């Protein structure tokens, strides 16, 4: 059994704790920490895990083999460095870090160790719909992939959500999807000015449109609409030289009749990607136990943060922004 410690027992941390306890084989949760100590104690008690009083105690606990980092993004880099120092594998929720400089520091520390310990929580790579899109590209079904149209809509955003966070928290998933599907880095980002929804908070640009240029010449267009009102709706169509492949709202029937056509949509990301999170966790547990991580790596985390930074820069400047990545360390080739 892989003994897992979890730092951050909010929304996704608690979901991960419960998923590992109920539907992932080969692992158990043995320790938790959250700055909200009552919350950590309650979640820990559900699964028989000890609630520590510091994040470092989870990482250094000799009973903990591997760590899940699910605290707020601005804590991730420091916690990832501590896990590397303790030589413990970690599943770090996105983002790996909130700045590309901090992400690079983490990547450099892992590269210096010379072996992979980090997986970043880009769970869409484990979604059955996205996997079918990836297969259709990789096996040549649609010819050469040329373009993609991506949609990422949330019914509503939490209070205080900003135009910048739409890039760093929502579009960041599309950034990873684009790099992964096309197998190429994003080299430039352009945030296109859009007409804000009258329902958007004052000063918030919502919806947003971003254009990504990839190193192989492909272009990916992303709509992020965090206040679309009607539900959580994620789509993607890749246009190839001989065909297209679309990820529509999957597993959902179209109802004809009654008030017309009705297509129920997931309420939120928890519902839409529930199975992807389970598959992601199972794959991570299996990979850690086998000693060879294979999911999204530290470099993917760094590149995603660097591109998100360029999106924010383009949002502010109104200009096309070139993405500058450092040289990829050998560990990630
Ligand atoms: P959340 O509900 O706010 O949970 C975060 C928890 O961490 C809260 O209980 C928070 O306590 C606690 N915390 C704050 N500072 C901490 C620290 N220094 N050490 C340990 N715990 C600390 O947030 P969330 O929605 O679960 O998001 C957590 C992370 O997961 C974020 O990075 C987010 O981007 C990522 N995420 C990823 C996905 C995905 O699809 N992959 C989905 C959702 C979230 P307080 O509330 O008292 O501050």
Image (cartoon, rainbow, N blue to C red):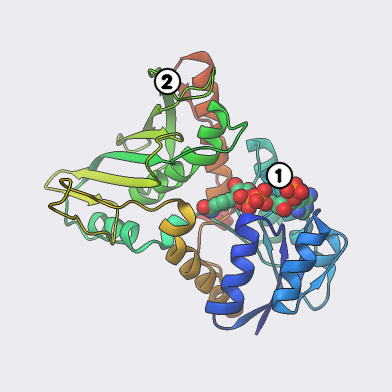
Depth check, front residue: 312 or 52 = 52
Q: How many labels does the image show?
A: 2
The residue depicted at 56 percent of the width and 68 percent of the height is 293
The relative height of residue 333 versus residue 202 in the rendered view (above or below) is below
Choose top left, top right, bottom left or bottom right for residue 132: bottom left
Judged left or right of residue 319, residue 65 is right
10 Å crowding of disc 1: few (<14), some (14-19), many (20+):
some
The residue depicted at 86 percent of the width and 59 percent of the height is 54
Judged left or right of residue 323, residue 217 is left
Judged left or right of residue 325, residue 4 is right
Measured as percent of width and height from the top left, residue 175 is found at 45, 41
Measured as percent of width and height from the top left, residue 101 is found at 68, 36
Nearer the viewer's eye, disc 1 or disc 2?
2
The relative height of residue 7 versus residue 192 in the rendered view (above or below) is below
Lower position in the chain sequence, tag 1 or tag 2: 1
The residue depicted at 34 percent of the width and 40 percent of the height is 151
Measured as percent of width and height from the top left, residue 228 is found at 40, 35
Depth check, front residue: 289 or 29 = 29
Q: Which residue lies furthest to the front in this view?
A: 258
The residue depicted at 49 percent of the width and 69 percent of the height is 278
Residue occupied by mark 1: 105
**Residue 173 in sight here:** yes
Which numbered tag is attached to residue 203?
none
Mark 2 close to ligand 1, CB under 8 Å: no
The relative height of residue 130 versus residue 229 in the rendered view (above or below) is below
**Residue 87 in sight here:** no
10 Å crowding of disc 2: few (<14), some (14-19), many (20+):
few
Residue occupied by mark 2: 198
């Amino acid at each position: 059994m892989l003994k897992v410690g979890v730092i951050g027992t909010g929304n996704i941390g608690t979901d991960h704790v419960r998923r590992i306890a109920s539907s992932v084989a080969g692992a158990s949760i043995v320790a938790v920490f959250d700055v909200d100590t009552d919350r950590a104690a309650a979640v820990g008690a559900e699964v028989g895990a000890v609630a520590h009083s510091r994040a470092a105690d989870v990482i250094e606990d000799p009973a903990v083999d591997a760590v899940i980092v699910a605290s707020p993004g601005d804590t991730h880099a420091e916690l990832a460095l501590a896990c590397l120092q303790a030589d413990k594998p970690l599943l770090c929720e996105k983002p790996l870090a909130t700045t590309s400089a901090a992400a690079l520091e983490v990547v450099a520390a892992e590269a210096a160790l010379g072996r992979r310990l980090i997986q970043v929580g880009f769970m869409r790579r484990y979604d059955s719909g996205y996997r079918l899109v990836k297969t259709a590209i990789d096996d040549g079904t649609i010819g050469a992939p040329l373009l993609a149209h991506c949609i990422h809509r949330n019914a509503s955003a939490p209070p205080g959500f900003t135009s910048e966070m739409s890039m760093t928290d929502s579009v960041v998933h599309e950034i990873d999807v684009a790099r992964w599907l096309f197998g190429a880095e994003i080299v430039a980002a352009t945030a296109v000015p859009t007409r804000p929804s009258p329902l958007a908070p004052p000063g918030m640009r919502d919806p947003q449109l971003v254009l990504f240029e990839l190193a192989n010449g492909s272009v990916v267009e992303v709509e992020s609409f965090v206040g679309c009102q009607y539900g959580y709706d994620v789509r993607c169509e890749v246009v190839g030289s001989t065909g297209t492949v679309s990820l529509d709202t999957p597993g959902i029937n179209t109802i004809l009749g009654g008030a017309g056509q009705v297509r129920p949509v997931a309420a939120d990301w928890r519902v839409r990607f529930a199975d992807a999170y389970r598959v992601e966790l199972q794959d991570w547990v299996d990979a850690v136990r086998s000693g060879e991580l294979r999911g999204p790596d530290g470099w993917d985390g760094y590149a995603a943060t660097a591109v998100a930074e360029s999106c924010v820069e383009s949002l502010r400047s109104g200009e096309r922004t070139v993405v500058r990545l450092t040289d990829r360390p050998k560990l990630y080739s």
